Image (spheres, helix red, strand yellow):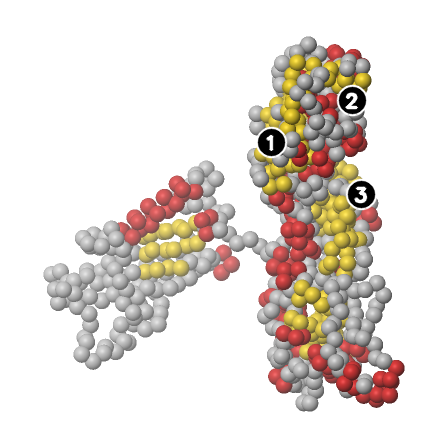
Amino acid sequence: MMDGFIQPHPVQGWGQGHQGERLFNTAPAHNSMPYPAASPADSLYDDLDDELDPYDAIYGELDLQKVYGQQLAIWTHRNPETIALFTPVQGDTFMNIVAFARTSLQFNTAVDKMMVLLPGHKRPLDMESVFIVKPGTAIIIAPLYDYMITLEIKQLGHKIDMVLNITMTVLELKTRLQTERGYPSDRMDLLYKDRPLENVRYLFEYGLAHSSTIFVLLNLKNDILVHVETFWGKQYHLYVDSCTTGFGIIASILRRTVSQSVVDVVRLYELFLPKHTLVLYLGSRVIDWDNCLGFYGVVDGNVLTMSTIGLAHDMAIQKVPVLLDTGRLHHILVSKFDRWSTVVLKLHGMTGYPVNLMKLLRHNSLPLDFTDAIGSVSSNAKAVTLDLSAMKMDDDLLYGIPLKFKIARGITELLKVAPSRTIKSVKDTLERVGVPNASMYDLVVDGYRLPNNKRVVDVIEEYKVPIELSLKQYPVFIHGHQNVIYKMLAYSKETLATFLMRVKMKTGLSFKDYLLLICGTVLNDDESLPVFDTRISVKSSIFLIPRKQYRSFFILHDDWLTKLRIPSYPKIKDIKDLLWKERNVPEGGLASIGSFLQWYFGAQGRDGAVKQEETPLKERMLEYEQNIGNRFMHLKVEQPNRRHPSNIKLEDESLEELEKMVAKQEEKNRARSLPPHSHRRKSRLPPIHRHMSADANRPADRHGLVKRKAYTTMQDVKPRKGRRGSRNKTGEQTVIPPPVYKYTDGAGEAGGDDQNKEWVFCLRHDYTLPAKGGRPTHH
């Protein structure tokens, strides 16, 4: 019986996770033990249950000798604000830690697992990959199984089921969505229970459970211009977003082939031309209907090709004769597997008539159904007739005025509208045909803004003049406290500081207590920039989240409890200083708690949301100040926002010109630091001897800098045996003192307030030339 019990069985759900990590798969619907239940006969050996614990094979082989007498920090995802300390003693095994976690942290081996976080590691490791527990190790209790999470994108009508590990960060989830679906990670907000998720937080911090639903809110900017070539011979220019799907491209194109009276073009073409008969190409790559363009790497200026499957693969191509309204006979090339709607679309490309107002008659009386397949057409078949009698019911076609709209980058959109229509209805029509957010723009003719309530015939006199689109204000949604949503108008030319002041007046909430969150990151743009140049775009959603100055952790050890307060966005140095100042935490557990806190808050540095950007090397200014009389050369590193000493503005000069000027100044400084007749005056400075020394008896220079004795002087250095000093080619001795390192203020004065001083690296080259007339010359 015992042999049958210890027979190895595979753990349920064990597999390969995302990015090659070994993870546990989704838990079953009803929690079952991950090991087979014992047979009834095994009940005779109930006394040996503790010795034959199947988890002993996983946890019992770890070596704890290096951490005897030291505290180990144990943390569980079920209570993320609690850290328990366990002190192993001589003879303890890892099973003692498991027993302690069961009693203190409600550790359940049926649904939870233990992982080891080694010091300096960014991610915890599975138990099977660790054999020795090192000092500073922390124990992480994570879910045994991954969770099945549903992500719902209402803007696109998509629902995605994903298996997630809740120990991953929100940004890692967004990155996975971008990799698998093409949604850009910097243009989406994740909401769980009406609460926005920050990029630097872990999923377990929001209480995510199995079968939960996360809503994805996309921030569409429509800043990518693509060109779509169709099989009916027309090319369309569309402004799309990287979140736009392939089906969205098809719907925008087909919307331009019907009249303005059609409201739902998708339902119309579901019968005439289903999407499974069409294909969209990016080069030679087929774009899936449900995937975003960002998944295929579509960028500004790409050309897409739209065709039917029969035409794309040249499947039974044949000619269909069509008699036009002008009496001219025309032959159209189509596949016999295409539908009659393909013929009508090709006629639309030739004549420009709307598809929904055209009819094809066979034998001049029998109308053809556009949903039927064309089939085989003989060479001597009679031509079908084009009927345009339905066009008499459309006012835009009968009395319409062709208007040219200047979209951007030299692209114009031609739209035929009735003179009696209002300007607002014209803008709505532009938005339906594919111009994004056209209803929010102002129509401008020769600098005059057209009122929305006026008719076209009353405000437009010259129809050949292109109409420009100008965006002066656009709506923004502020998600305030208790799920209250405020709709505001952001003016494109106002500064961010003015907009934030209006948000404060609108919501009544102070920014001292709340943070502005957009796309998972805190809004920290320059407040002097215009709103349109920031991340706040049209119909953006901005969330006001409470500002937490500190995050509390409760440390449990034996019979006492300590509350540890840590800043919300700490650095590693802050964590170390805080732990050393905390007297109630035992010294043996500082390293283990520090390892855990470094992992817990390390996501902020990995995700880059809080980490400050370093100044690029090319933007750093090197200022060379040289005093020829005193032979000083100062090397000062200035801040990038400061002004160059030569009154040169960085924004007015190109980077190449600036680099040339700095290189030229460096060359001049090198030349001036050498003697007048030196053969190396135009090359480099003379070599410095290895002795780092200076003359301590030199008087103060013009700047009032006191000469201090640094390291040793030449008199203190004992010459080696057989050497009395270095001599030049003429046999005369040359003495080169080493450089002096000092700290001076910006003006070169030794006195003054220490807070106003700048740390300057001073490099001094003094050397003695060969004696002329019995007297050495100093430079």
Find residue 227 and name its label. Answer: 1
Find residue 368 and name its label. Answer: 2
**Mark 2–mark 1 distance (CA, rounded to whole Å):** 32 Å
- Give the x, y percent position of residue 313: 62, 35
- For image coordinates 61% across by 27% down, the residue present is 235
**Mark 2 surroundings within 10 Å by alpha-carbon count, few (fewer than 14), some (14 through 19), many (20 or more):** some
Q: How many marks?
A: 3
- Give the x, y percent position of residue 356: 77, 22
Residue 10 visible: yes
- For image coordinates 35% across by 70% down, the residue present is 710
The residue that mark 3 highlights is: 485
**Mark 3 surroundings within 10 Å by alpha-carbon count, few (fewer than 14), some (14 through 19), many (20 or more):** some
- For image coordinates 80% across by 50% down, the residue present is 194
- Nearer to us of marks 2 and 1 is 2
Q: Which is more toward the observer, 507 or 274?
A: 274
Q: What kind of element bears circle 2?
A: loop
**Mark 3–mark 2 distance (CA, rounded to whole Å):** 52 Å
**Mark 1–mark 3 distance (CA, rounded to whole Å):** 37 Å
Residue type indicated by callout 3: Ile
Mark 2 or mark 1: whose residue is earlier in sequence: 1
**Mark 1 surroundings within 10 Å by alpha-carbon count, few (fewer than 14), some (14 through 19), many (20 or more):** some
Q: Which is more toward the observer, 136 or 558?
A: 136
Mark 3 or mark 2: whose residue is earlier in sequence: 2
- Horizontal arrangement in the rendering, residue 39 relative to residue 337 (left or right): right
Mark 1 or mark 3: whose residue is earlier in sequence: 1
